[in-house]
Amino acid sequence: MQYAEITGWGKCVPPAVLSNDDLATFMDTSDEWIFSRTGIKERRICHCNFSDMAIVAARRALAAADLAPADVDLILLGSLTNDSLCPNTASIIQDAIGAVNAASIDINSACTGFLYGLHIGTSLIRTGAHKNVLVIGGEFISHYMNWAKRDVAVLFGDACGAVVIEGSDQEVGLLASKIGCEADAKYAIQITNLGSAYSRLSDDFRYVDWNFDGQEVFKRAVKSMSLACANVLEQAGLTVDDIDLVVPHQANKRILDSLAKRVGVPQEKVFVNVHKYGNTSAGTIPVALAEAVDEGRVKPGDYILTASFGAGLTWGAGLIRWGDRVKPLQKSDAELPPNDKTALEIIAPHIERYLEHAKTTK
């Protein structure tokens, strides 16, 4: 049987840090208020294009796998904050890294974008349709924040991660996965005026706004992810005791704690970095996975459980068996363009625009 081993991994987080104290300089909040409710201390703010982050993460993942870009035959990009809708951003990344033989697909399932991509890419390798797939997940979500509203603006940050998956005869990689969607709750997370359904009806669509039903999201997220985790464990014939590490979507520390309790996983087995980056949507799992490997939290042969949920409300879980290698074969010198601004300086024009807009729409 054909499997799809994770042979390369890489991340890209922008250097500019936006702390909770920074947020308190222009909105009614505090470090204590944010941290006690979310577990977030800071997040990163991108100073360039989203594709720049994705290109760096992709090049680092390819170097770790020692795979030439021309050998990649499929690129799957999970994101809702792409550089452009046309051309698709996966094609921008393909051209930049020189993956001349790849097909390139954008996937918009919000926070589940990477997990959906890993599910699709693995399935295509296992059928023999593809051999070497680059799966990327990330967001430039600070660009879509209403900085006049703290309920959503304190949650999110920018980052990107990537993995390379290659065909293997060994029983490794994503061994079981389950994805789905509770569409009856699709508006529990909603960017309310971005897209053709809105822009043709309003002259004000450049001011992005959100609907975010926190209680509904919390309830649905914990339930759907825990059920999906149970499903993939059953598929693989394993129990929670067999799991070495859980790498879940980093949305909110309360959700992570509730998921661990419901699944029955001890807290020490759950990898957490939400305090450093906030919710980077489709970027959370690949960034966390890359960090877990680099920090020595992943050992050869480990079973890794992952789960995510996102707008839609999309959800999913996956059971990964790690291969023999936990060190990159090569290292990339890819870096983001230079930045000399603080996070507050980067978003200052957006803050001013949204605060002024809030005054005129009261």
Image (spheres, grey):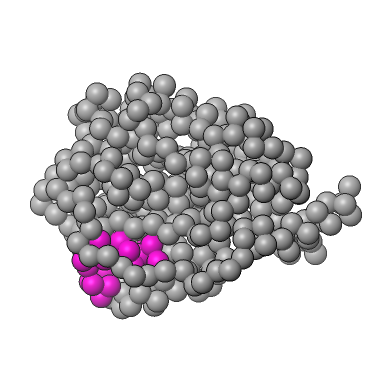
* Residue 67 belongs to magenta span: yes
Quick check: 140 left or right of 308?
right
**Looking at the image, which is closer to me, 58 or 166?**
58
At a point 14% along the width and 54% down the height, the residue shown is 168
At a point 46% along the width and 31% down the height, the residue shown is 256
**Looking at the image, which is closer to me, 152 or 185?**
152
Please state the horizontal and vertical placement of residue 32, each as a whole percent of the image. Answer: 64, 32
- Residue 250 visible in image: yes
* Residue 137 belongs to magenta span: no
- Residue 183 visible in image: no
On screen, residue 230 above or below 313: above
- What stretch of residues is rendered in magenta? 56-78
Quick check: 137 left or right of 313?
left
Quick check: 16 left or right of 58?
right
Q: In the figure, residue 225 lies in which quadrant?
A: top left
At a point 80% along the width and 64% down the height, the residue shown is 203
Please state the horizontal and vertical placement of residue 217, each as a whole percent of the image. Answer: 57, 34
Please state the horizontal and vertical placement of residue 81, each as a whole percent of the image. Answer: 55, 60
Q: In the figure, residue 160 lies in which quadrant?
A: bottom left
Q: In the figure, residue 78 lies in which quadrant?
A: bottom left
Please state the horizontal and vertical placement of residue 302, each as a whole percent of the image. Answer: 21, 38
Count numbered badges in the picture.
0
On screen, residue 222 above or below 120: above
Quick check: 128 left or right of 221?
left
**Looking at the image, which is closer to me, 98 or 127?**
98
On screen, residue 362 above or below 307: below
At a point 55% along the width and 69% down the height, the residue shown is 339
